[in-house]
Amino acid sequence: MSQPARILLVDDDLSLLRLLSLRLEAAGFEVMPVENGELALGSLPGFRPDLLITDLRMDGMDGMALFEQVHRRHPFLPVIILTAHGTIPEAVQATKKGVFSFVTKPFESRELLEQIQQALEQSRLSESMSGCGNDQQWRAGIITRNAAMEELLSRAYRVAGGDASVFIEGESGTGKELLAKAIHRASPRAEGPFIAVNCGAIPENLLESELFGHRRGAFTGAVQDHQGLFVSASGGTLFLDEIGDMPMPLQVKLLRVLQEREVRPVGATRPIPVDVRIISATHRNLEEEMKSSRFREDLYYRLNVVTLSLPPLNHRRDDIPLLAEYFRESLAQRYQKSITGFSRSAMELLMTADWTGNVRQLYNVVEQAVALSPAPQIQVGLLQDAIKDRADDIIPFADARRQFELDYLIGLLQMTRGNVTQAARLAGRNRTEFYKLLHRHALDPAQFKD
């Protein structure tokens, strides 16, 4: 007989802590309730939980501080954060840092239990998948050696094993659809369909029919039944790209579909059940869209169970030579040209250019150079013609070091709330040396105490 999953539950509201404990124990879990983060950290070695559930706002150590300490010691322990209505910024930051999901108070027991089951599935998969396995086919086409990208892919692989909705954020051209396909290939739904739709590219009057389907005669031009993309993707994954461009009336209907797991085609009298995993993406800042009442907060929570943030190409410049050579080789085969590489000055230009269009722009530039190159080696002149905006020169080493020190010191002071002794110990410096660093960057520890 298998042992029940162990849940460490943290909340400084004793009545809620007691109520949640009873509900989770009734659901078959072994629960250890504690009332603050310090007690939770002390309970970890002996209790060895499979899941941590913590409130976000607590006296003393809050939920995010607790998560960060736990995540350093137990990187594969999933964490669910309970958050009050209206704390979207904190919740968004939590998912970016690796929190499995957040659940908004007040919540239904069913909703929390669903999140718990998905988190426990991830926990069982994580240890065996920590290196993403030997089979790399799931991430085919994603070319990187960048540490941040590898960490992102590792997290994507782990979340693929469950069925949680995934929200991918990133600038245009960073490869959001490519990552969505990779998650689909790594998921239990890999044998099912993967269907992508750009919500901003379809007129509003057609998008509802495209997503949910319609019946013959439902409107002018509906000469036959159309089943819609939700039904077509049933058993697989539906990727809703540029979800931030979806009109508000359709957001309401999409929310209902996600809640009820059924669609009602335009002109139909009966709903159709659907089994679809949703991956969504946008280049827009949905927090700002919600503040401006252009995106529904409840839909955001439904879509944004797990957030994956793709970095812009300018933040992963170590990948540029790798990507450029990969594109050059594949495009040379397509154009049937003997293009063997880039000149040194050409590669230097690629490394320092301002890639506002990200990986997509890099691909287009390399394609133009391959198509036009009269010689086996691509010269810098061809790239200068293709790249419209030249990046500023790489900043000097001294400036880069100064900026790193400033960011590093600010991070330490924020983490320790202005405690210089603790910050100096974390930095491996004595107090005198640490004070000199603070003075050099005009940082006042007192400003970080609140």
Image: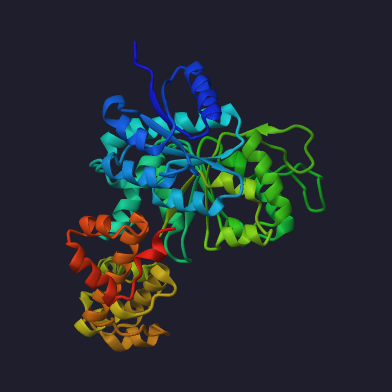
Q: Residue at x 39, y 31 (%)?
A: 51
Q: Residue at x 27, y 58 (%)?
A: 423
x, y percentage for residue 133? Answer: 25, 40
Most distant residue in the top direction: 1
Quadrant of the rendering where the C terminus is positioned: bottom left
Q: Residue at x 25, y 79 (%)?
A: 347
| Residue 254 image-quadrant placement | top right
In the image, residue 146 above or below residue 17:
below
In the image, residue 435 above or below residue 374:
above
Quadrant of the rendering where the N terminus is positioned: top left
Q: Nearer the viewer, residue 3 or 87?
A: 87
x, y percentage for residue 251? Answer: 68, 50
Q: Nearer the viewer, residue 203 or 389?
A: 389
State left or right for residue 42 relative to residue 173. left
State left or right for residue 62 relative to residue 48. right
| Residue 443 image-quadrant placement | bottom left
Q: Residue at x 69, y 57 (%)?
A: 247
In the image, residue 152 above or below residue 275:
below
